[in-house]
Image (cartoon, coloured by chain):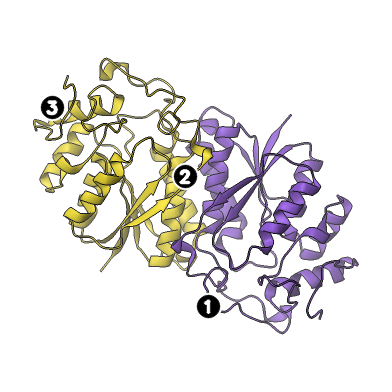
Chain colours: A yellow, B purple
Amino acid sequence: MKRAIVLLSGGLDSTVTLAYAISKGYEVIPLTFVYGQKHQRELKSAREVVEYYKLRNHVIFNLESKIFSSSALVSSSLQIPEKKSTDEIGGGIPSTYVPARNIIFLSIAAGLCETEMADAIFIGANAVDFSGYPDCRPEFFDAFRKVLEVGTKRGVEGKPPELETPILLLTKAEIVKLGKSLGAPLHLTWSCYRGTEKACGRCDSCLLRLKGFREAGFEDEIEYEVKK
Amino acid sequence: MKRAIVLLSGGLDSTVTLAYAISKGYEVIPLTFVYGQKHQRELKSAREVVEYYKLRNHVIFNLESKIFSSSALVSSSLQIPEKKSTDEIGGGIPSTYVPARNIIFLSIAAGLCETEMADAIFIGANAVDFSGYPDCRPEFFDAFRKVLEVGTKRGVEGKPPELETPILLLTKAEIVKLGKSLGAPLHLTWSCYRGTEKACGRCDSCLLRLKGFREAGFEDEIEYEVKK
């Protein structure tokens, strides 16, 4: 059976990616990072998704470090930006950019591939809605494929792990539709940048998620403080 | 003043690399990883080297994780191989290979470059004596340069950090000579795979170091149990 490391944050995108990897017949090892996010709500969702699929071997990797502190997602001195609508999103690299996050996540996934003899890494990165992140772009993933090919033991032995980005070029609506078609537990996922009991409905991430569900023609079953 | 992140293990190679970066006029931020090595002797050396150069901002990054456990350098169930001479070294990927280590180290250095606005990363990797490690080869560093170019904020903004590998193609004797010419504190460095009070003089790393000093025509001032 083919084996895959799947990066799982507990958000919508990574959960749909996990569902996709399972649907392709992979034995899945979910890999979740704790990196000083302002809230642990996402981690709770990740655990619930893992439980939903009855997966064992959930790897939770602790990366708490000051190197991430320049991002609004982890710094208590930077405010997460609020937008009135998704039209305001975009233009430059957002303050929620976490320095080299995907580079670091994928490098640790590469290490795990070596120890677990995995055949693939799945990452739910998306270049459509958040083209502002440098490490969410197709050219970055192509560059990292080369690293896996020449920089790992499995690569040198002729079996480099595949780097799969199944939702990279999908819109949020398409991701919701894919998730629904795969029976992914979208009701367990968390996208809000805040960690309150209900999703705020006002941050970039909430706005994009709500727009995605609306356009896909599905109801978002999680609770919101405000639903625009 | 140009600023550089320098990976510093406390060994000979990384210390010479640090001395080289300083000689090139960089303001240096040393980055040391704790990743479940069997011993902390190297870390002690790293601290002493940092103190020798009166550097502030020594970043010590804790990466203790089971993903590294398949390497003889960190696993208590695997024995570090003993060789009779350096002629026996080579042929295949050694059991001391730490899965994706340099990929992970460089990715975290990339993150630190973003937060510290650094212009370069220096790594004391060497492809001559240990060509068995996939992530010590020139083609790996070329692939990682591309990652820095397309996957970081500074790269996208047209200022990708340089990835400097000044000793990549030097023999151990040439590294010793370079270190001596730069006044690097080689007597503070530690190369032995074991963490005993004196270097063992029998592991791959000790044998290569001793051979390097001998060929360079310098006395190795650290203490050995056995000096072949």
- The residue mark sitting in front, 1 or 2, is 2
Residue sitting at 24 percent across and 24 percent down?
A207
What residue is at 28 percent from the left and 37 percent from the top?
A169
Toward the bottom, the furthest residue is B84
How packed mark 1 is, by other alpha carbons closer than 10 Å (few <14, some 14-19, many 20 or more), is: some
Specify the amino acid type for callout 1: Leu
Relative to A57, B91 lies left or right? right
Identify residue type, mark 2. Answer: Glu
Residue at mark 2: A64
Amino acid found under the numbered disc labelled 3: Arg
The x and y percentages for residue B196 are 70, 73
Q: Which residue is mark 3?
A: A214
The secondary structure type at the circle numbered 2 is loop
> Which of the image's four quarters has the C terminus of chain A?
top left
CA separation, marks 1 and 2?
29 Å
Real-space CA distance between mark 3 and mark 2, rounded to the nearest whole angstrom? 35 Å
Q: Which residue is denoted by mark 1 in the rendering? A: B78
Chain holding disc 1: B
Labels 3, 1: front one: 1
